[in-house]
Image (tube, rainbow, N blue to C red):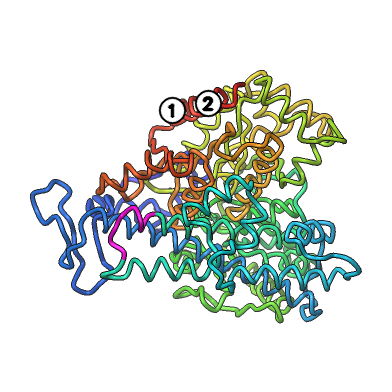
Amino acid sequence: MEIIVKSSDDAVAALCPVAESEGIATVFDRYKAQQPQCGFGSLGLCCRICWKGPCRVDPFGDGPSEGICGANRDTIVARNVARMMAAGAAAHSEHGRHIALAMQRVGKGELPAYQIRDPKKLTAIAERLQIDTKDKSVLQLAHDVATKTLEDYQNQDHHKGCHWISASVPKKRLDRLAKLGVLPHNIDATVAQIMARTHIGCDAEPGNVFLGGIKGALADFNGMSLATELSDAMFGTPAPVVTEANIGVIDRQSVNIAVNGHNPLLSEVICDVSREMNQAAIDAGAPGGINIVGICCTGNEVMMRHGVPLATNYLSQEMAILTGALDAMVVDVQCIMPSLPQIGDCFHTEVITTMADNKMQGARHVDFCEDNATATARKVIQFAIDAYGRRDANKINIPDIKRTAVVGFSAEAVMDALAQVDAVDPLKPLLDHIVTGNIQGIALFAGCNNTQSVQDESYQKIAKTLAANNVLLLATGCGAGAFAKNGLMNQQATELYAGEGLKAVLTAVGEAAGLNGPLPLVLHMGSCVDNSRAITLATALANRLNVDLSDLPLVASAPEAMSEKAVAIASWSVGLGIPTHLGTMPHVTGSQVVTELMTEGTKDLFGGYYLVETDPDLAGEKLVEVIRNKRLGLGI
Ligand code: NFS
């Protein structure tokens, strides 16, 4: 059998043969088994929203041009993509709601496992949300912040935008969105409205459906903004920390526990409890004690806040088990491969689900809620320690591949670093360098891994092109994982790949911030919900220049966008006015109307647009060109 490795990650190349010799199918094999993939679905032309269907519209015009109900290609494609935005918004916003409800209870003193670790940030949030902070204790303020945040899930007044988006983007942008009728007033209502209007026999006008989707995407932005900010208040605002990334962070001598998923509520407590149970692991025969490693965005969360090393990103999550030295993988929500328990069965690895509404066939389930957080953490760690005793030494194969990564660049951390250069006006050095051209612009890399691409490859190629052209690089989610694993989040990468202007700035700021060298080439801003951090920074710049986000030399890139969440993020990015590159062909090209609306029509509506380019070399050049034109627009 031919081994398929669609990855540029050496660790994946090293571990795929293990899967083959054990007779285990990985994501790469399953990808192959799906070929050729359905052409109708790839074009967005398959409609499954009622039981008269499925209906398929012929892309070449020889067969049916309408579904049985009469919906044409444009309606079908628009409904499909809008529903993806709604699902993405639901996922992020559930995560946000979970955090907000927990914080409300922390405020009432009901959850002893949690604290407000960053009261300064809590106060800053309260002020942003126009909550009176006077004479309030930290817990009272936490309660009030959470309660006001939860209004974004409850408000029924259509004329009032959600609190969080209103407090997070420039006024000019809010006015533009309000005029277009796409400013969300309530996250839940907006998601429900997309589901309602795309039900059989409802909204059939493709542009109208699409705008409804954008409103849902902006609700997604709202949900992720509040998730990020409240998490910072509860768990701490990330600051620069040196750590490592890639599969070699799994340690033969330790009880290895991977935390995988997205929501920090459990993983934070696991980090706390692991310290207290370290001796138990040593007593069980593991001289290294407990070694927590991260995968996907839970990995990013604990990496940013605690320097926990990142084992891998989405597409290679199965590889962690194939090392034969992973004792437990503890998962919460989102982007978790349902194949994990089956692979765990081939080794000694405990795959443990923890959320009542995110279970997997074949996994052990330990139910987590905030009330039993510490007990749950103890229980899963004990399962890992027990599993360590069942390891088969002959099956251990940990490729010695890991790279240094300097991570933890929250918006606050970036401002703190800049404040070392100009304490009175921290934004000034950044603005000055943008004006002089030492920094040509800013690019945010976001999104997933996708089997349609060679894993991590496009990220690296595009980043190197942009860096050579003096573009400041930010990254989140599995994009950040791609850079961290492959050595682009360290100081050497800055020396190697940054253009002269960019290198000078990163060096000056890094030296001033006490890093004994430059900032890393790509700044790790966090998990996917932390894309909101980049908007915090961009909004500060736009407000300072008294321009809109769409005027800034700012681009976003999702070279391997995959999930519904990524569709939502790319869409709010466009809605906020940012030219947004997609390296994956979106499932919309069956409709010329929708395709043109997304790539051209959005320019007039929002200033942002979807820039689709699957070739990473061309994508890099095109993004440089977009930045150049934005600079001309600003007269710099
Ligand atoms: Ni974002 Fe994070 Fe990764 Fe994509 Fe999934 S883990 S939330 S959706 S795959 S970046």
Q: Can residue 189 be seen in this view?
A: yes
Q: Residue 250 carries which label?
A: none
The one nearer the camera, 367 or 234, is: 234
| Residues rendered magenta in the picture | 203-210
Which of 346/189 is in front?
A: 189
**Image point 71% across, 76% down: which residue?**
373
Q: Does the magenta stretch include residue 550?
A: no
Q: Is residue 201 left or right of residue 167?
A: left
> Judging from the image, what secondary structure is the residue with disc 2 in?
helix
x%, y% of residue 545? 68, 34
Mark 1 and mark 2 in contact (Cβ < 8 Å)?
Answer: yes
Q: Residue furthest left?
A: 62
Indicate the quadrant where residue 132 lies. Answer: bottom right
Magenta stretch: dominant secondary structure: helix
Q: Where is residue 598 in the image (x, y as percent from the top left)?
A: 38, 44
Residue placed under numbered mark 1 in the picture: 617
Task: Give neighbour class at mark 2: few <14, some 14-19, many 20+ (Cα, 10 Å).
Answer: many
- Residue lying at the far right in this picture: please name it: 135
Height in image: 85 above or below 246? below
Asked which secondary structure carries label 1, the reply is helix
Give residue 192's quadrant in the image. bottom left
Kind of residue indicated by mark 1: Asp
Q: Residue at x 42, y 43 (%)?
A: 602
Q: Name the residue under label 2.
A: 465
Picture residue at 51% right of the left edge, 41% below the top: 9
Q: Callout 1 environment at 10 Å: few (<14), some (14 to 19), or many (20+)? A: some
Residue found at x 56% / y 70%: 157
